[in-house]
Amino acid sequence: MTETKEEIVDEIAYESLWQGKLSISGVELRLVFKIYKSEDKLQVHLDSPDQGAKNIKGDVDYYNKDSVKFTFTQINGRYEGKFENENTIIGKWYQAALNLDLVLGKVDKVVEVKRPQEPQPPYPYKEEEVKFKNEKADITLDGTLTIPEGSAQFPAVVMVSGSGPQDRDENILNHKPFKVIADYLTRNGIAVLRYDDRGVGKSEGDFGKAISTDFANDAIAAVEYLASRTDVIDANKIGIAGHSEGGMIAPMAANRSESVSFIILLAGPGTTGEQILIDQSRLILEASGVSKSYIDKQEKLIIKIYEVIKSEKDDSIATEKISLYFDDFTAQLTDEEKSEFESDMAGFKQRIPMLLSPWFRYFVAYDPAGELEKIKIPVLALNGSNDLQVPADVNMEGIKAALEKAGNKNHKLIKLEGLNHLFQASETGSPVEYAKIEETFSPEALKIIRDWILEITSR
């Protein structure tokens, strides 16, 4: 499946619901096909609960007593199957180069995804939709500012999201961590500004052409906007809280703006982008039960690819080299490995342009130590022990060493046991668990963030 924005639909009376599980490299993903009638014609919506995708619109090519075919142009996918009986369809899911078995069973109700922490109005604080300008990029960004009740000037935090195009809530798999954080902090006397990434939601700009330094300028624009709001914000008590890549952007922005008085790194990197991706790949595959033999072979491939990305500036030559390395890699695989990882390898060469994008080239080569070694303001760094995407120990060591080199006397680093990359209480930390966990953001982590901000802004 491919993640996609859900289509907003009115309440629909579905005629039948069919659910099945795709198995991709040991990972199970539920798919739900929802049949309905529109203008006397059968239509279908597709949900992928484990990916947070809902109501992807599709066409019913045919649906008769013998067989079915559903096509989803938006995600380049289709399902074809035959009825084994009135409650079971045996078929296959096709998407791009994927060709996967998928058995559907008739169900009575749609899978319910629970997110008990998501705030619901009315809120005991003020909420404003705001716009602010990044003058360097000549774009206007759109966000939500939550302000505690009262007439004081409040300390404030700008939220900066992780990699990939994110909305102001950092919406992932039906979780809205930034909304949860903003609600908690604002209820406790701290104003929060969260905003749509450039080119996302209501914000202007082109996300695809931007690199991390551009996102740092967006964050600075958000800080400067808060500094201008002296009606409700204490301009001397404005910080940045960045998650994942946002934890890399926060130090960049802080070193470029005197208006930033503290930073919070949530699963922020302390090693190079290349090392993070290598570690991430190995840990996630290990958590999925993949053999050491395959992991070792893939890691050698990844290292070669990253060397090309860093050293070869010509995209066409880089593409050729990466393709040859991939061919050598597949030639070394056993027949069993080729069969098991067919879906992972399918379409790899079509993804090479993404590997050579300006953002990815920048991220692979980037070392956060350079910015962290210049940070003198207070720093709080939180990492989860189960984080497989930005592993806690090695990255916290990198952050600590850099801050000590900076002579920073006011930093606090905490590893939180059992939390994953999204700061959820987890079993293994595997990304497969993210959607299945009802908790959006650890209450323990929320309390630590609140107490630390109130402490440093009360001095």
Image (spheres, helix red, strand yellow):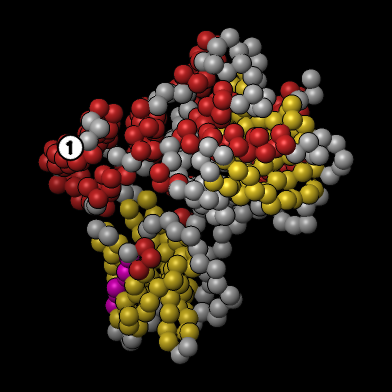
Q: Is residue 45 visible?
A: yes
Instruction: Look at the magenta stretch and give its main secondary structure.
Output: strand
Give the residue displayed 65% in from the left and 27% down from the top. 260
Say which of 358 and 126 sits in front: 358
Quarter of the rendering containing residue 113 = bottom right
**Image point (35%, 27%), residue name:** 365
Residue 279 visible somewhere in the drawing: no
Q: Is residue 140 rendered to the left or right of residue 226? A: left
* Figure check: 289 above or below 394: below
Q: Is residue 81 left or right of residue 381?
A: left
Name the residue that disc number 1 marks. Answer: 317
Quarter residue 75 falls in:
bottom left
The foreground one among 430 and 357 is 357
The residue that appears at 78% across and 52% down in the rendered structure is: 123
Magenta stretch, residue numbers: 77-85
Side (left or right) of 243 relative to 56: right
* Towards the viewer: 146 or 211: 211
- Give the quadrant of the C terminus: top right
**In which quadrant of the rendered image does the N terminus lie?**
bottom left
Q: Amino acid at mark 1?
A: Ile
- Image position of 107 with respect to 155: above or below: below
**Crowdedness near tag 1: few (<14), some (14–19) or many (≥20) residues, C-alpha within 10 Å:** few
Image-quadrant location for residue 320: top left
Indicate the secondary structure of the residue bearing disc 1: helix
Q: Is residue 83 magenta?
A: yes
| x and y, in percent, of residue 188 in the image | 78, 38
Residue in view at x 68 percent, y 49 percent: 130
Residue 150 counted in the magenta span: no
Q: How many marks?
A: 1
Q: Position of residue 233 (x, y in %)?
A: 77, 36
